[in-house]
Image: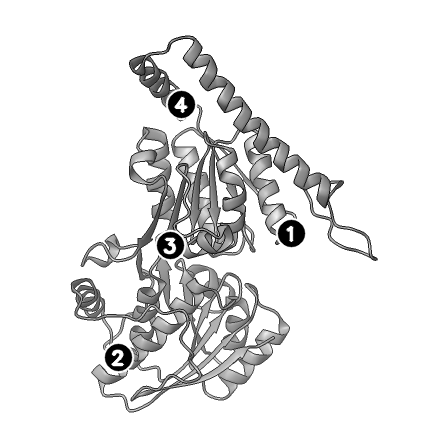
Amino acid sequence: MLFKSNGVENGKAITYNGLSVKEYAWRKIMKKFLSVGLTAAMAVSLAACGSSSSSSSSSAKSTSSASSSDMAVAMITDYGDITDQSFNQTTYEACKAWAADNDVKFNYYKPASDADADREASIEQAIDEGYNVIVMPGYAFAQAIVDTVEDYPDVKFIALDVAQSDLDKDSGTDGWKSDNTFCAVYEEDLAGYMAGYAAVSLGYTKLGFLGGMAVPAVIRYGYGYVQGAEQAAEDKGVAEVDINYAYGNKFSGDSDITAAMDTWYGNGTQVVFACGGGIYTSAAEAAQKVNGKVIGVDVDQAATIDSTYGDGMTVTSATKGLAATVKTTLDACKDGTFSDKYAGTCQNLGLVSENPEENYVQLAESTQWGDGFSEDDYKALVKKMYDGDIKVDNSVDVDLSKVSYDHVKVDYQGNLK
């Protein structure tokens, strides 16, 4: 059973799996104390045995080899779950497929709630059950990483969309890192730019951006989208592009958000970039009523959206290489190169080639190419971006209510709820 946070109800104190907050904190302190004590005792024991540096090195190599052969992978979900048809599901499926291909034990865990204590509890449960590689998708894991990973030096942690700034903020330390942890973030501003450029080039001039929550990754997608639309309007001679811009303040759709999307589409919006987990459902439900279009995010969502809401609804998807990151890092865990290639680093993954398919951010293969934006046009755009001829602002503190462009007009509506 997952280690559950029971919350506050009818004035009662918060408990974690039957423990009071005080008892839970004491358990964490004692676990760390015992871990440190055991490490020290082992060091004294090795010294007493007169271990030479060469024998220590041999022992370490043997341990590394054993841990690789005994590798077991666990994934912990963040806000969503493995059926969100986006970030969590892609990470889950990539982990599961890799484990099956490599004959490695795999399981996933869903925290009892959206709380740091429950994320930490799921991590601890996975480790207690024998998993020694933990994959965590989502910036929300930053605090759990800071609180947990150093207690388990023999476990490898892979965090997707957790930035150095997230770790520094939650640890109170500049440049915080742990030698058993790798964090990857993506240049979503570049993928958003491609999507905005494609939309306007394909003839859409009434756009929308529906973000999940105003977190850095979503903000970068949205701001890049606006910049791409502006450049396409300049290049294509489009006088004016209107963009409705808002956040649902959650990573799922609901009736209130759908009602807002009904208003957007009803007032002429042609295509909405739905950016944030399952929030695309509200955009797609509204688009379906008026034969509108959507743009997917993180993964190629065309098959999912079109099969549910109507063929041809998804113009494109702004994607990032979640599956590729999972594969390369798990490969490194297995072959023993994780420490050299990834451990103790936060890497910002984006364009690594002028060839679109080789990059960590790109447009989906299902993109509806047209006369205004062909596959060759896309390749030319990516080459310009890779060569540095096009520069995209990746700011996350921009005030879009005050942004002014020659062609794009942004109607910034903040949080819808």
Q: Position of residue 144 (x, y in %)?
A: 54, 46
Instruction: Give the residue displayed 46% in from the left and 39% down from the top.
Output: 96
Amino acid of disc 4: Ser
Q: Residue furthest bottom?
A: 239
Instruction: Give the residue displayed 45% in from the left and 65% down from the top.
Output: 306
Where disc 3 sits, the SS reads strand
Q: Nearer the viewer, mark 1 or mark 2?
A: 1
| Mark pair 1, 3: CA separation | 24 Å
Amino acid of disc 1: Ser
Question: Disc 4, disc 2: CB below 8 Å?
Answer: no
Local crowd size for mark 2, using a 10 Å CA cut-off: few (<14), some (14–19), many (≥20):
many
Where disc 2 sits, the SS reads helix
Q: Which residue is label 3 attached to?
A: 185
Residue 188 lies left or right of residue 249; in this view the side is left
Q: Which residue is label 1 attached to?
A: 113
Q: Residue furthest top?
A: 49
- Mark closer to the chain start, 1 or 3: 1
Local crowd size for mark 4, using a 10 Å CA cut-off: few (<14), some (14–19), many (≥20):
few
Q: Which residue is label 2 attached to?
A: 232
Q: Position of residue 260 (x, y in %)?
A: 56, 80
